[in-house]
Image: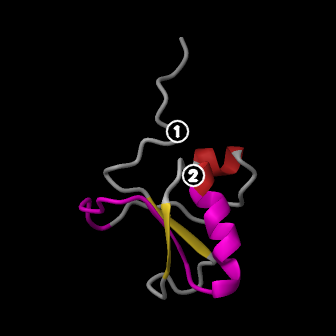
Amino acid sequence: GEAAVAGGWNVATQANASTTDFATTTVYYEDPANEAAALGLAQLLGGAAIELSSNFPGAALTAVLGTDYAGPGLEAPVA
């Protein structure tokens, strides 16, 4: 969430997934008109995959960080 906000994105909700077995970080979009936005967020998150899906009703975009996530927000704090 913090990396997206820092990148200029509006983050409405943050939550933990009900399982931790997501292997691949993916940005899901419900409306094909949001594909370009999904690509932009995926790029911000370090090159995540994108997928058209109706599994997240009411959300324009949903980012699920998988076990492969190595993008922004994981840097060690600067002392």
Q: Nearer the viewer, mark 1 or mark 2?
A: 1
Residue labelled with disc 1? 73
Q: Which residue lies under the disc numbered 2?
A: 1
| Label 2 Cα neighbours within 10 Å, binned few <14 / some 14-19 / many ≥20 | some
Nearer-the-camera pick, 57 or 33: 33
Mark 1 secondary-structure assignment: loop
Residue 6 coordinates in the image, percent (x, y): 70, 44
Residue at 35 percent across and 64 percent down: it is: 17
Between 46 and 17, the one lying in front of the other is 46
Image side of residue 35 versus residue 54, left or right: right
Q: Residue furthest right?
A: 8
- Quarter-of-image position of residue 16: bottom left
Colouring: secondary structure
Q: How many marks?
A: 2
Q: Look at label 1 and name its amino acid.
A: Gly
Q: Is residue 21 left or right of residue 36?
A: left
Expressed as whole percent of the image width and height from the top left, the position of residue 57 reads: 53, 86
- Residue 65 appears at what percent x and percent y? 42, 56
Chain part drawn in magenta: 18-42
Give the image quarter of residue 24: bottom left
Q: CA distance from mark 1 to mark 2?
A: 9 Å
Q: Is residue 76 visible?
A: yes
Residue beneath the point at 26% across and 65% down: 19
What secondary structure is marked by label 2?
Answer: loop
Badge 1: residue crowd in 10 Å (few <14, some 14–19, many ≥20)? some
Q: Is residue 28 above or below residue 16?
A: below
Expressed as whole percent of the image width and height from the top left, the position of residue 44 reads 62, 50
Residue 12 visible to an observer of this rendering = no
Q: Residue at x 52, y 60 (%)?
A: 14
Q: Earlier in the sequence, mark 1 or mark 2?
A: 2
Amino acid type at mark 2: Gly
Residue at 24 percent of width and 62 percent of height: 21
